[in-house]
Each structure stands twice: as C-alpha cells, then as structure tokens.
Amino acid sequence: MRMVLAALALLLAAGAYADVDARLDQARQAIEAHLQSSQRPGLVIGITDRQRLREVVVHGYSDLKTRTPLTAQSRFAIGSISKAFTAIALMQLADEGRFDPHAPITRYVPSFAMRSKYPPVTGHDLLSHTAGLPYYLPDTASSRAALLSLKDFEPTYAPGAHWEYSNTGFQVMGYALENIEAAKYDAIVQRRVLERLGMSSTSAIIDDAQRDHMTVSYTRWPYDGSYVESSWFEYLAADGSIVSTVSDMAAYTRFYLNRGQGPKDRVLSEQSFKALTTPVLENYAYGLDVREDKGHRVISHGGGIAGFRSHIEAHPDEGFALVFLSNGGMDESLRPWVVELARAAFADQPLPAAPAPDADPLMAPLGDYAGHFRAGEGKTRAIDVRLVGDELLLAGPEGKRRLQRMGVNTFRAEGEVGDSQGYFFARTDDKPEGAVIGVSHGIDWYSTAGRAPAPPKEYAAYVGHYVNNGPEGPVARIYVRDGKLVAAMYVEEIFAPLPLTPLGEGVFRLGKEDYSPERAKFDGILDGHAQRLTIDGVPLYRRETP
C-alpha cells in the first residue's frame, strides 16, 4: 500500500511539474515576443527553481559590429552583484572564527584610517553601507591606493547612523579578505564561493585576458540615442569584479532559495546566512537588498560596470529566482513584468499582459521643451523655445539658434558663437513625465514662473563642464537652478541633478541629504573661472566645450 501511495505521489508531482514547465514555456514565449521591439544591444534572462534552471531567454547581440548573436553561454560582468560574493566569503571566515564583523575593521586592515571623531568603523558597517564612506573613488578604485585616499576623508556621521551606498567600503572589505587569507581576492572567491556553488564558467577578475571571452558592452551616445562601445578597463576589486553566465548566476541564486545550502553541502552556517540576509538599514543587508513584496521575502541586487547591467532576484518563499544579464541596459518596465510572469507560472495563475513600451527620457519629444521662459529677480530677459518642423529653435539674448540634443533634458546651441554652458531643462520633481518648468544656462535660470532668487556672485566662477579623463570619468556639468548651484553627474548614464549646498569658500555638500558624505570643492580660479572641481578627492578639470 505504501508503495502504491508513493508511486501516486510521484505521478502527481510529475504532473504538477509538467504544468509548471508548460506555463514557464508560455512565459518565455511572451518575453521573447515583447523583446522583439527592444532596441537594446542584448539581454539574457534566466528563471530557476530550487533545483535547476528552468527557462532561458536570449535576445540580441554580443557584438553589434559583427552581428554576433548572444547565447546562453555568453559571459557578462555583473558589477555590484559581486558585493555579496565578498560578504559570503567573509561570513565563511566568521564561521571559522577568523572574522568578526563587529570588530573594528583596522583589526583586519591596519592601514585603514580616516579623520574621524566617531567610534571605529566595523566590517558590519562596511558590509551594510552604514559606515559613511564616499560612494566611489574612480581614480583609486581597484587599487589599495583607495586606502591612501581615505586618510584625508572625514565622515559626517557616526557608523550605523545612516545608510549611504559605498563601493569604496566594499573595496576595503576585499582587502580585509585578502589580508586574512594571505591570498588574492579572485583566488579566494574562486575557492570559497564559485567552486562550492558549481559556478564553473565564472571568474572573479576582469582583466585583459578575460576580454575575448566576454560580450562587448555598450553605452548610449546622448546626441542621437544610438549605442557605442563602452570604455574597457581592468577591474580587480571586491565591489564589482565578477564575470559570469546565466546558468552560473542561476546556481548562485539557488544558494538563496535554499537558505545557504550549495549543491553538495552548506556554504554558510544558518547563523551566518541569517546575518548575511538580515537588513540593517534601508532594506539593505550584507551586499544584498532584502525586502517584503506581497507578503513574501525577496533577496535581490543590481549591478553595473562599463556598460554592463545586471540584476538578480530570489523569492525563497515562492521557490523561484531570476537572473538578468545585459550588455547595454534594460527597459525599466521589463524586470517587474518578468517577475510577475514567473510568480504567476509557479503559482498556477494567469500570466500578466506585457507592459506598454517605456518612454525614452533621452529621446523625449522636442515639443516638451517649447515655451516662454523668463529670468527672475525683476530681470526683463527672457528666452523662447519653439518647435519648428522637427527642429527646436532658441530665441534669446544671443539671437536665434538651433538646439541640439546632448543628453536627458539637455541641449546645446549651435551657431557661430561658441557656447560652453549648455541648456538644462528642469521638469516637475525631476521626473521624466513631469512638465518642463524652466531652463538653466550657466548662471542664468529662466522659468515659466519667472520668479527666482539671484544666485551668489561667486557661482559664476563655478558653472561649467568638468571632466576626469579616466575610463570611468566622472563628468560633471555645473549650473544654477532657481538660485542654487546644481551638479549633473555623468558616469555612463545621466543621473538626476544633485544640489550643491555651500559649506565654506568653494566647498559644497553634494546630494540631497544633509548627512551626505560627498564633498565638492572648486579651486584654481583663472580668468574668473574655477579650473578644477574635486569630488571626494577625485579631480575633474574644466572644459570649454559643452
């Protein structure tokens, strides 16, 4: 009788499994149909359960120039998803009694030092982005010279008080890992994580030897929205140096679905897995976003480096996980829809309809910018922006000129007279769908309301275009909006305008939060213009073209 019941149970399970396979196949077909209209270079999506990779969607090209198609074996850099690999290796050391996340990090990295009046920074603070370190130092990233750069850094709050994402902090944790193990980061991660999870096509180093075995990555040319090859650079640091495939990343997500269990044994103890995945602040754990969604726990993280974009999302309660690997970005509406497709397929629910195509903020209709904009503080100057045919024309103090797109809500004026400032249009709440409410041109702000405080006179020396010539930039455009100094930061993609709050002569806090650790300093005044902008110790130099 027991044998009959067991056989019946197996048959029922096989039937249920087949039903899931059929629904997942329908989901895959829906995703493939939706991607046919995508203009992105390439994307690979994986759907896995607790045991195996169930579906793979492959769309686009690994090399646009040669029209080489992507495959399920294509290798992508995963960027910041690498952070949790670092955390896993460190928590293994915690299981072995060789690492205490609550001890001062100087126990493991004696050369770590800052100008701080606060209690010592711990590994826990760095792993959870609550240490108050700067976001990123591109000129010393992937080098222990980052530790030297931090010696003059002064945090603005005590460890644990606030959450501020810091790539630099995870680089420090990589050096802690190397010091404890007396080995190189990539070899440690290979032995401790990749081999134990069966990730045989993954490496923890981005170097020149890897380049021929990776897809080509792309960024958008802001003038017309086309895709150009991203700058190549080697990267060896613990915040983003892993290269992988969809099947290997699916194996990685199964580590979370199975709560720390690998294919052969436990990779982390239950205690360490709990520490790894327990949020500290802002739904962030150790290199992981952990949140509740519709009553279920979700463990996720995104990544981006040199044009590559990636995302993983594990749903342990629901028994599935997703992997997204791209060499040129993803549409914003795609990922949540694919999540709902997978959720419906595993729960035997109707599959949701495909979302409407995303609006492209880079190529917003030119008519959005047409209008009459007036200067504030009783000034009589005004500019008119008109749509004439398929051209945007500017009529202002310098006469009539055509506006050429050069970024999201950003244009430059053509003509015989050079213009190094650019025109930065502002939308309500800085949202892509917001109405255009004004336009900045250097120190001048023109708005539909026509009311704005006059900016301090010294701001005239700061406005302009600043560039660091390294492969990762950064690039900043400084202008005045509504009487305040603003920075538009460009690192591969255009980000929302960041306010600059004055702290002293030529020194500003960068960012919206009053506890932001980011600092900007203008100096080297020549002919009335600052020639250098230093952001967290990284120098950028003035350019006279927009």
Image (cartoon, rainbow, N blue to C red):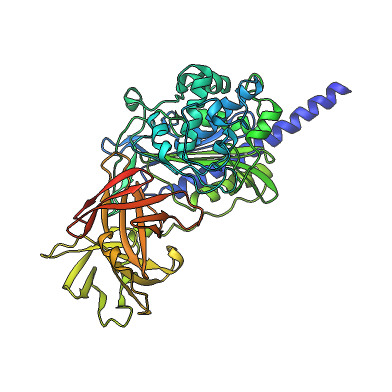
Position in image of residue 423 (x %, y %): 27, 65
Give the side of residue 258 with respect to residue 510, left or right.
right
Residue at the (69%, 46%) spot, across then down: 296
Judging depth in this view, the residue of 488 and 458 nearest the camera is: 458
Give the side of residue 543 with respect to residue 1, left or right.
left
Position in image of residue 64 (x %, y %): 29, 39
Quadrant position of residue 387: bottom left
Judging depth in this view, the residue of 138 and 320 nearest the camera is: 138
Residue at the (29%, 68%) spot, across then down: 457
Residue at the (84%, 27%) spot, across then down: 5
Residue 246 in view here? no
The quarter of the rendered structure image containing the N terminus is top right
Give the side of residue 462 with respect to residue 350, left or right.
left
Residue 296 in view here? yes
Give the side of residue 535 with respect to residue 441, left or right.
right
Farthest residue, direction right: 1
Please say if 34 is above or below 404: above
Please say if 440 is above or below 374: above
Quadrant position of residue 198: top right
Judging depth in this view, the residue of 370 and 458 nearest the camera is: 458
Position in image of residue 11 (x %, y %): 75, 29
